[in-house]
Amino acid sequence: MPSAYTITRMTEEPLFENGKAASKILVEFKVGTDGPFFERFPKEGFNGGLVQTRLTQFAAELQRLRT
């Protein structure tokens, strides 16, 4: 079973994409004692389910690398 992840910080990042102002949500997290790791998500449509899915997949992949 993959180690649990812990979100340590979430911040909004202003940036430019294709010459237009945009924002992303930067999620900083740890998997067990490993990390910090970062994932970026579009601000538009940001939701907890998306974050949970992506971080769970990341934690599972990290566990596979160790076995």
Image (cartoon, rainbow, N blue to C red):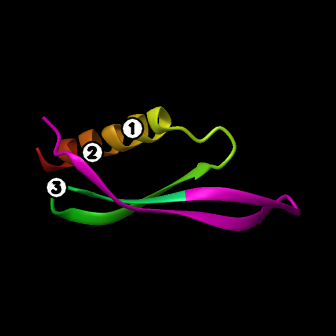
Res 52 label: 1
Residue type, numbered disc 3: Gly
Residue at 21% x, 63% y is 34
Residue marked by disc 3: 32
Viewer-nearest of discs 2 and 1 = 1
Residue 17 placement, left or right of 41? right
Identify the element where label 3 is drawn.
loop
Membership of 14 in magenta stretch: yes
Residue at 39% x, 38% y is 52
Residue type, numbered disc 1: Gln
Q: Quadrant of residue 36?
A: bottom left
Residue at 15% x, 62% y is 33
Q: CA distance from mark 3 to mark 1?
A: 15 Å
x, y percentage for residue 20? 87, 60
Q: CA distance from mark 2 to mark 1?
A: 10 Å
What range is drawn magenta here?
1-25
Q: Residues within 10 Å of mark 3 (few under 14, many from 20)?
A: few
Going from N to C along the chain, the mark reached first, 3 or 2, is 3
Residue type, numbered disc 2: Ala
Residue marked by disc 2: 59
Viewer-nearest of discs 3 and 2 = 3
Membership of 23 in magenta stretch: yes
x, y percentage for residue 37? 36, 62
Going from N to C along the chain, the mark reached first, 2 or 1, is 1
Identify the element where label 2 is drawn.
helix
Res 34 label: none
10 over 3 or under it: above or below: below
